[in-house]
Protein backbone atom coordinates (compact mmCIF):
# COMPACT_ATOMS: atom_id res chain seq x y z
CA UNK A 1 0.00 0.00 0.00
CA UNK A 2 2.77 2.35 1.02
CA UNK A 3 4.62 1.54 -2.17
CA UNK A 4 1.43 2.11 -4.26
CA UNK A 5 0.85 5.54 -2.60
CA UNK A 6 4.44 6.58 -3.23
CA UNK A 7 4.19 5.60 -6.88
CA UNK A 8 0.95 7.61 -7.23
CA UNK A 9 2.55 10.58 -5.47
CA UNK A 10 5.62 10.45 -7.72
CA UNK A 11 3.43 10.11 -10.82
CA UNK A 12 1.26 13.10 -9.83
CA UNK A 13 4.39 15.15 -9.23
CA UNK A 14 5.83 14.13 -12.61
CA UNK A 15 2.53 14.97 -14.33
CA UNK A 16 2.34 18.43 -12.75
CA UNK A 17 5.98 19.15 -13.67
CA UNK A 18 5.23 18.11 -17.23
CA UNK A 19 1.99 20.15 -17.31
CA UNK A 20 3.83 23.17 -15.93
CA UNK A 21 6.45 22.50 -18.59
CA UNK A 22 3.90 22.34 -21.39
CA UNK A 23 2.15 25.52 -20.21
CA UNK A 24 5.46 27.29 -20.81
CA UNK A 25 6.48 24.91 -23.63
CA UNK A 26 9.72 26.24 -24.93
CA UNK A 27 11.16 25.82 -28.35
CA UNK A 28 14.94 26.03 -28.29
CA UNK A 29 16.43 27.54 -31.42
CA UNK A 30 20.11 27.27 -32.26
CA UNK A 31 21.41 30.49 -33.84
CA UNK A 32 24.79 29.92 -35.46
CA UNK A 33 27.54 32.23 -36.65
CA UNK A 34 31.29 32.13 -37.10
CA UNK A 35 32.55 35.26 -35.36
CA UNK A 36 33.51 35.59 -31.70
CA UNK A 37 31.17 35.93 -28.74
CA UNK A 38 30.41 39.65 -28.30
CA UNK A 39 31.35 40.45 -31.92
CA UNK A 40 28.99 42.45 -34.16
CA UNK A 41 27.13 39.26 -35.18
CA UNK A 42 26.93 38.16 -31.56
CA UNK A 43 25.33 41.48 -30.59
CA UNK A 44 22.69 40.86 -33.24
CA UNK A 45 22.02 37.32 -32.02
CA UNK A 46 21.72 38.49 -28.42
CA UNK A 47 19.30 41.27 -29.41
CA UNK A 48 17.28 38.77 -31.47
CA UNK A 49 17.14 36.35 -28.53
CA UNK A 50 15.83 39.03 -26.19
CA UNK A 51 13.22 40.30 -28.63
CA UNK A 52 11.84 36.92 -29.68
CA UNK A 53 11.61 35.84 -26.06
CA UNK A 54 9.71 39.05 -25.19
CA UNK A 55 7.35 38.82 -28.17
CA UNK A 56 6.59 35.13 -27.62
CA UNK A 57 6.33 35.39 -23.84
CA UNK A 58 9.22 32.98 -23.44
CA UNK A 59 8.07 30.39 -25.97
CA UNK A 60 11.17 30.76 -28.16
CA UNK A 61 14.56 30.47 -26.50
CA UNK A 62 17.56 31.24 -28.67
CA UNK A 63 20.89 29.54 -28.01
CA UNK A 64 23.81 31.36 -29.56
CA UNK A 65 26.31 29.04 -31.24
CA UNK A 66 29.21 31.43 -31.80
CA UNK A 67 32.73 31.19 -33.21
CA UNK A 68 32.03 28.42 -35.70
CA UNK A 69 30.86 25.97 -33.00
CA UNK A 70 28.57 24.41 -35.62
CA UNK A 71 30.93 24.87 -38.58
CA UNK A 72 31.83 27.46 -41.20
CA UNK A 73 29.26 29.62 -43.00
CA UNK A 74 28.76 27.13 -45.81
CA UNK A 75 28.11 24.34 -43.27
CA UNK A 76 25.67 26.59 -41.40
CA UNK A 77 23.67 27.38 -44.54
CA UNK A 78 23.54 23.69 -45.45
CA UNK A 79 22.43 23.03 -41.85
CA UNK A 80 19.46 25.33 -42.39
CA UNK A 81 18.51 23.46 -45.54
CA UNK A 82 18.54 20.07 -43.83
CA UNK A 83 16.97 21.43 -40.64
CA UNK A 84 19.85 20.70 -38.25
CA UNK A 85 20.01 24.36 -37.19
CA UNK A 86 17.24 26.95 -37.02
CA UNK A 87 18.85 30.38 -37.46
CA UNK A 88 22.10 31.72 -38.95
CA UNK A 89 23.80 35.02 -39.57
CA UNK A 90 26.33 34.77 -42.37
CA UNK A 91 28.25 36.96 -44.75
CA UNK A 92 27.47 36.67 -48.45
CA UNK A 93 30.78 34.75 -48.81
CA UNK A 94 29.31 31.31 -49.51
CA UNK A 95 25.79 32.52 -50.31
CA UNK A 96 26.40 32.85 -54.05
CA UNK A 97 26.88 29.07 -54.14
CA UNK A 98 23.22 28.77 -53.08
CA UNK A 99 21.70 31.91 -54.63
CA UNK A 100 23.90 33.18 -57.52
CA UNK A 101 21.79 36.39 -57.73
CA UNK A 102 23.54 37.63 -54.56
CA UNK A 103 27.02 37.45 -56.13
CA UNK A 104 26.57 40.98 -57.43
CA UNK A 105 26.92 42.22 -53.83
CA UNK A 106 30.43 40.77 -53.65
CA UNK A 107 31.81 42.91 -56.47
CA UNK A 108 34.68 45.07 -55.21
CA UNK A 109 34.14 48.82 -54.80
CA UNK A 110 30.44 48.49 -55.58
CA UNK A 111 29.01 50.39 -52.61
CA UNK A 112 30.44 53.83 -52.01
CA UNK A 113 29.87 53.92 -48.24
CA UNK A 114 27.92 52.42 -45.36
CA UNK A 115 24.97 54.74 -45.91
CA UNK A 116 24.55 53.72 -49.54
CA UNK A 117 24.92 50.00 -48.78
CA UNK A 118 22.41 50.08 -45.95
CA UNK A 119 19.80 52.08 -47.84
CA UNK A 120 20.03 49.83 -50.91
CA UNK A 121 19.86 46.62 -48.89
CA UNK A 122 16.97 47.95 -46.79
CA UNK A 123 15.04 48.98 -49.92
CA UNK A 124 13.47 47.39 -52.98
CA UNK A 125 16.73 45.89 -54.32
CA UNK A 126 17.51 44.29 -50.97
CA UNK A 127 13.99 42.86 -50.74
CA UNK A 128 14.24 41.40 -54.25
CA UNK A 129 17.53 39.71 -53.37
CA UNK A 130 16.12 38.34 -50.10
CA UNK A 131 13.26 36.84 -52.10
CA UNK A 132 15.77 35.21 -54.49
CA UNK A 133 17.65 33.70 -51.54
CA UNK A 134 14.36 32.32 -50.19
CA UNK A 135 13.82 30.41 -53.44
CA UNK A 136 16.65 28.07 -52.40
CA UNK A 137 15.22 26.11 -49.48
CA UNK A 138 16.14 28.96 -47.14
CA UNK A 139 14.13 31.73 -45.42
CA UNK A 140 15.92 35.07 -45.76
CA UNK A 141 14.75 37.38 -42.97
CA UNK A 142 16.90 40.51 -43.32
CA UNK A 143 20.13 41.99 -44.59
CA UNK A 144 22.51 42.65 -41.76
CA UNK A 145 26.12 43.82 -41.85
CA UNK A 146 29.70 42.62 -41.73
CA UNK A 147 31.42 45.77 -42.99
CA UNK A 148 33.99 47.07 -45.48
CA UNK A 149 36.80 44.59 -45.89
CA UNK A 150 40.52 45.39 -45.50
CA UNK A 151 43.67 43.34 -46.04
CA UNK A 152 46.01 42.05 -43.32
CA UNK A 153 49.19 40.01 -43.75
CA UNK A 154 52.33 38.91 -41.98
CA UNK A 155 54.89 39.57 -44.73
CA UNK A 156 55.11 43.27 -45.54
CA UNK A 157 53.14 46.50 -45.76
CA UNK A 158 50.76 46.61 -48.73
CA UNK A 159 50.84 50.08 -50.21
CA UNK A 160 49.92 49.36 -53.81
CA UNK A 161 48.34 46.41 -55.65
CA UNK A 162 51.88 45.41 -56.72
CA UNK A 163 52.60 44.53 -53.08
CA UNK A 164 49.94 41.80 -53.30
CA UNK A 165 52.01 39.95 -55.89
CA UNK A 166 52.34 36.30 -54.89
CA UNK A 167 50.92 36.78 -51.38
CA UNK A 168 48.80 33.84 -50.23
CA UNK A 169 45.62 35.63 -49.17
CA UNK A 170 42.76 33.67 -47.68
CA UNK A 171 39.50 34.62 -49.35
CA UNK A 172 35.96 33.54 -48.65
CA UNK A 173 34.59 30.67 -50.73
CA UNK A 174 33.27 33.17 -53.24
CA UNK A 175 33.90 33.16 -56.98
CA UNK A 176 33.86 36.97 -57.33
CA UNK A 177 36.40 37.48 -54.53
CA UNK A 178 38.68 34.75 -55.88
CA UNK A 179 38.57 36.35 -59.33
CA UNK A 180 39.31 39.83 -57.90
CA UNK A 181 42.33 38.71 -55.88
CA UNK A 182 43.68 36.69 -58.79
CA UNK A 183 43.33 39.73 -61.05
CA UNK A 184 45.20 41.87 -58.50
CA UNK A 185 48.16 39.45 -58.56
CA UNK A 186 47.65 37.68 -55.21
CA UNK A 187 47.36 33.93 -54.72
CA UNK A 188 43.85 33.57 -53.30
CA UNK A 189 43.26 30.61 -50.98
CA UNK A 190 39.56 30.06 -50.30
CA UNK A 191 38.94 28.68 -46.82
CA UNK A 192 36.20 28.57 -44.21
CA UNK A 193 36.70 31.21 -41.53
CA UNK A 194 37.03 28.86 -38.53
CA UNK A 195 40.24 27.51 -40.12
CA UNK A 196 41.79 30.90 -40.82
CA UNK A 197 43.48 31.79 -37.52
CA UNK A 198 45.37 28.48 -37.30
CA UNK A 199 46.34 28.69 -40.99
CA UNK A 200 47.77 32.17 -40.39
CA UNK A 201 49.54 31.01 -37.25
CA UNK A 202 51.11 28.07 -39.07
CA UNK A 203 51.92 30.38 -41.99
CA UNK A 204 50.08 28.18 -44.45
CA UNK A 205 48.73 31.50 -45.71
CA UNK A 206 50.25 34.99 -45.49
CA UNK A 207 47.14 37.09 -45.07
CA UNK A 208 43.40 37.44 -45.06
CA UNK A 209 40.84 40.18 -45.60
CA UNK A 210 37.93 41.11 -43.37
CA UNK A 211 36.15 44.10 -41.87
CA UNK A 212 37.48 45.83 -38.72
CA UNK A 213 34.80 44.18 -36.48
CA UNK A 214 36.13 40.76 -37.54
CA UNK A 215 39.83 41.70 -37.41
CA UNK A 216 39.42 43.05 -33.87
CA UNK A 217 37.13 40.33 -32.49
CA UNK A 218 39.35 37.56 -33.90
CA UNK A 219 42.53 39.02 -32.28
CA UNK A 220 44.17 39.05 -35.70
CA UNK A 221 47.09 41.10 -34.32
CA UNK A 222 48.40 37.91 -32.72
CA UNK A 223 49.17 36.46 -36.16
CA UNK A 224 49.21 39.47 -38.53
CA UNK A 225 51.55 42.50 -38.49
CA UNK A 226 50.24 44.66 -41.33
CA UNK A 227 46.81 46.10 -42.08
CA UNK A 228 45.94 48.12 -45.19
CA UNK A 229 42.62 49.95 -45.16
CA UNK A 230 41.62 49.12 -48.73
CA UNK A 231 37.89 48.95 -48.00
CA UNK A 232 37.86 46.92 -51.21
CA UNK A 233 34.39 45.45 -50.78
CA UNK A 234 31.34 45.99 -48.61
CA UNK A 235 30.43 42.69 -46.97
CA UNK A 236 26.75 42.36 -46.10
CA UNK A 237 25.45 40.01 -43.45
CA UNK A 238 22.23 38.08 -43.85
CA UNK A 239 19.90 36.57 -41.25
CA UNK A 240 18.49 33.24 -42.39
CA UNK A 241 16.01 30.75 -40.92
CA UNK A 242 15.46 27.11 -41.75
CA UNK A 243 12.35 26.22 -43.78
CA UNK A 244 11.66 23.38 -41.32
CA UNK A 245 11.34 25.90 -38.49
CA UNK A 246 9.40 28.36 -40.65
CA UNK A 247 6.68 25.90 -41.64
CA UNK A 248 5.89 25.22 -37.97
CA UNK A 249 5.20 28.92 -37.25
CA UNK A 250 1.85 30.69 -37.29
CA UNK A 251 1.54 33.94 -39.29
CA UNK A 252 1.77 35.90 -36.03
CA UNK A 253 4.95 34.07 -35.02
CA UNK A 254 6.51 34.69 -38.43
CA UNK A 255 5.88 38.39 -37.84
CA UNK A 256 7.70 38.15 -34.49
CA UNK A 257 10.73 36.57 -36.17
CA UNK A 258 10.80 39.35 -38.77
CA UNK A 259 10.58 41.97 -36.03
CA UNK A 260 13.35 40.28 -34.02
CA UNK A 261 15.52 40.16 -37.17
CA UNK A 262 15.13 43.94 -37.61
CA UNK A 263 16.16 44.49 -34.00
CA UNK A 264 19.17 42.20 -34.57
CA UNK A 265 20.23 44.17 -37.66
CA UNK A 266 20.14 47.44 -35.69
CA UNK A 267 22.26 45.93 -32.89
CA UNK A 268 24.82 44.52 -35.34
CA UNK A 269 25.10 47.79 -37.25
CA UNK A 270 25.57 49.70 -33.98
CA UNK A 271 28.45 47.41 -33.02
CA UNK A 272 29.97 47.75 -36.52
CA UNK A 273 29.92 51.53 -36.03
CA UNK A 274 31.57 51.26 -32.60
CA UNK A 275 34.25 48.92 -33.94
CA UNK A 276 34.86 51.18 -36.93
CA UNK A 277 35.29 54.14 -34.57
CA UNK A 278 37.76 52.50 -32.16
CA UNK A 279 39.06 49.40 -33.92
CA UNK A 280 42.01 50.79 -35.87
CA UNK A 281 43.48 52.42 -32.75
CA UNK A 282 43.02 49.18 -30.88
CA UNK A 283 44.85 47.24 -33.60
CA UNK A 284 47.68 49.79 -33.62
CA UNK A 285 47.82 49.52 -29.84
CA UNK A 286 48.38 45.80 -30.28
CA UNK A 287 51.34 46.52 -32.56
CA UNK A 288 49.86 46.28 -36.05
CA UNK A 289 51.23 48.62 -38.69
CA UNK A 290 48.24 50.32 -40.31
CA UNK A 291 48.41 51.79 -43.82
CA UNK A 292 45.58 54.31 -43.98
CA UNK A 293 46.41 56.27 -47.11
CA UNK A 294 45.49 53.95 -49.92
CA UNK A 295 45.38 54.67 -53.63
CA UNK A 296 41.85 53.34 -53.99
CA UNK A 297 41.80 53.96 -57.76
CA UNK A 298 44.83 51.71 -58.23
CA UNK A 299 43.14 48.89 -56.30
CA UNK A 300 39.87 49.47 -58.19
CA UNK A 301 41.72 49.15 -61.48
CA UNK A 302 43.59 46.04 -60.33
CA UNK A 303 40.38 44.16 -59.52
CA UNK A 304 38.55 45.48 -62.62
CA UNK A 305 38.68 42.15 -64.52
CA UNK A 306 36.35 40.66 -61.88
CA UNK A 307 33.61 42.93 -63.28
CA UNK A 308 34.13 41.65 -66.81
CA UNK A 309 33.93 38.02 -65.72
CA UNK A 310 30.88 38.73 -63.57
CA UNK A 311 29.00 40.54 -66.36
CA UNK A 312 29.82 37.78 -68.86
CA UNK A 313 28.25 35.22 -66.52
CA UNK A 314 25.44 37.12 -64.82
CA UNK A 315 24.67 40.19 -66.95
CA UNK A 316 24.70 43.74 -65.63
CA UNK A 317 21.04 44.53 -64.83
CA UNK A 318 21.26 44.37 -61.06
CA UNK A 319 24.79 45.78 -61.06
CA UNK A 320 23.62 48.86 -62.95
CA UNK A 321 20.60 49.29 -60.68
CA UNK A 322 22.86 49.25 -57.62
CA UNK A 323 25.33 51.67 -59.20
CA UNK A 324 22.51 54.03 -60.25
CA UNK A 325 20.97 53.97 -56.78
CA UNK A 326 23.97 55.73 -55.17
O1 LIG B 1 35.75 36.11 -43.76
C1 LIG B 1 34.66 35.56 -43.59
O2 LIG B 1 34.48 34.38 -43.87
C2 LIG B 1 33.51 36.38 -43.06
O3 LIG B 1 33.75 37.73 -43.20
C3 LIG B 1 33.22 36.08 -41.58
C4 LIG B 1 34.39 36.41 -40.70
C5 LIG B 1 32.92 34.59 -41.40
C6 LIG B 1 32.02 36.87 -41.10
O4 LIG B 1 30.90 36.68 -41.88
Image (tube, rainbow, N blue to C red):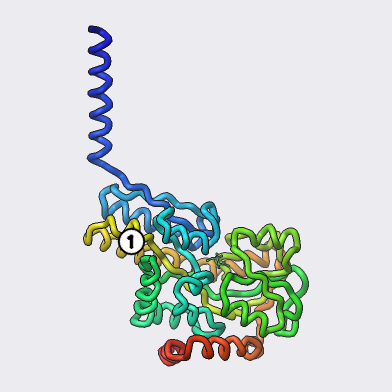
Residue 138 image point, x, y percent: 39, 66
Q: Nearer the viewer, residue 12 or 100?
A: 100
Left or right for 53, reference 293: left
Mark 1 surroundings within 10 Å by alpha-carbon count, few (fewer than 14), some (14 through 19), many (20 or more): many
Q: Residue drawn 47% across and 90% down?
A: 315
Q: Residue drawn 55% across and 79% down?
A: 233
Q: Residue furthest top?
A: 1
Residue 267 image point, x, y percent: 41, 63
Q: Residue drawn 37% across and 68% down?
A: 140
Q: Is residue 88 above or below residue 175?
A: above
The part of the image, by quadrant, that contains residue 89 is bottom left
Residue 273 image point, x, y percent: 49, 70
How many marks on residues? 1
Q: SS of the residue at dot 1?
A: helix
Would you name the residue on which mark 1 appears? 260
Residue 5 image point, x, y percent: 23, 12
Q: Residue drawn 71% across and 79% down?
A: 186
On the question of residue 178 being in view, the answer is yes
The part of the image, by quadrant, that contains residue 294 is bottom right
Q: Nearer the viewer, residue 104 or 114?
A: 104
Left or right for 15, reference 125: left
Q: Quadrant of the C terminus?
A: bottom left
Left or right for 146, reference 206: left
Amino acid sequence: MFRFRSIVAVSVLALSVSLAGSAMAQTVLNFGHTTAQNSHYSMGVQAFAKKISELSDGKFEVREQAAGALGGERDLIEGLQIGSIELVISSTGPLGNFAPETLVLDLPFLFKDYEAARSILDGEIGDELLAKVSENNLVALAWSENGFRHITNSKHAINTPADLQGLKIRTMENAVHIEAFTAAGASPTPMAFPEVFAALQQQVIDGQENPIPVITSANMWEVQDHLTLTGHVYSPGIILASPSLWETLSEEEKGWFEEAADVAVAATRKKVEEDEAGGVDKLRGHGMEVIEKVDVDAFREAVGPAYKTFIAKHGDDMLTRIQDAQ
